[in-house]
Image (cartoon, grey):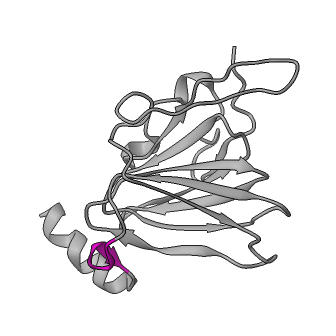
């Protein structure tokens, strides 16, 4: 049985944070739309191997891959939302937190296992922080880079969310 104690969501309103139980894999915390994806892991005494296939392990065809590394202590990355792009964020090395916000609620996901990915659908504001030394954030994206897909101003993002909620 896989232990999820390494992936934790801090939610001050919940007595037991989402993400601590094995049954939380594949479910969204409080309807946020994000979910943890457990990736295949082939154990070997010489070192483990994880592989990822688009439309198999992630819910989209992978069109772009990028990674963040050498992030100085105290810095954060992200701080934007995407109109159409979906992504899966993986702690390929080390650890970091991903804060996901849908305009009405937010959750902090602590990632530190390379065989778990955090699926983030379109129209979710995200930022990454609390990077450990030597960490690498690997991101699988559903679309090629397109600046027009980004919301970089939070107020503009919130205004775009309002019509969707009615």
Would you place residue 153 above or below residue 23 in this image? Answer: below
Q: Please state if 75 lies on the left or on the right of 65 as rendered.
A: right
Total marks drawn? 0
Decide which of 136, 28 is in the foreground and name it: 136
Dividing the picture into quarters, in which one does residue 46 lie? top right
Q: Where is residue 16 in the image (x, y as percent from the top left)?
A: 64, 38
Span of residues in magenta: 146-151
Q: Where is residue 118 in the image (x, y as percent from the top left)?
A: 52, 45
Q: Can residue 12 be seen in this view?
A: no
Residue lying at 74% horizontally and 73% vertically, measured from the top left: 71
Decide which of 126, 134 is in the foreground and name it: 134
Would you place residue 104 above or below residue 113 in this image? Answer: below
Would you place residue 108 above or below residue 6 in this image? Answer: below
Is residue 11 within the magenta segment?
no
Q: Is residue 122 visible?
A: yes
Quarter of the image that includes the C terminus: bottom left
Dividing the picture into quarters, in which one does residue 157 lie? bottom left
Residue lying at 74% horizontally and 34% vertically, measured from the top left: 5
């Amino acid at each position: 049985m896989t232990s999820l104690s390494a992936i934790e969501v801090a939610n001050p309103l919940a007595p037991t944070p989402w993400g601590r139980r094995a049954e939380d894999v594949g479910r969204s915390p409080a309807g946020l739309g994000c979910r943890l994806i457990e990736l295949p892991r082939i154990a070997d005494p010489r070192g483990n191997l994880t592989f990822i296939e688009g439309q198999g392990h992630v819910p989209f065809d992978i069109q772009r891959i990028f990674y963040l590394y050498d992030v100085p202590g105290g810095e954060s990355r992200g701080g934007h939302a995407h109109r159409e792009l979906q992504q899966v964020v993986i702690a390929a090395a080390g650890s970091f937190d991903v804060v996901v916000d849908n305009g009405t609620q937010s959750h902090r996901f602590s990632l530190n296992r390379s065989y778990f990915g955090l699926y983030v659908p379109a129209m979710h504001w995200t930022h990454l922080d609390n990077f450990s030394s030597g960490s690498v954030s690997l991101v699988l994206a559903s679309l090629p880079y397109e600046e027009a897909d980004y919301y970089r101003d939070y107020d503009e993002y919130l205004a775009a969310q309002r019509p969707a909620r009615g």
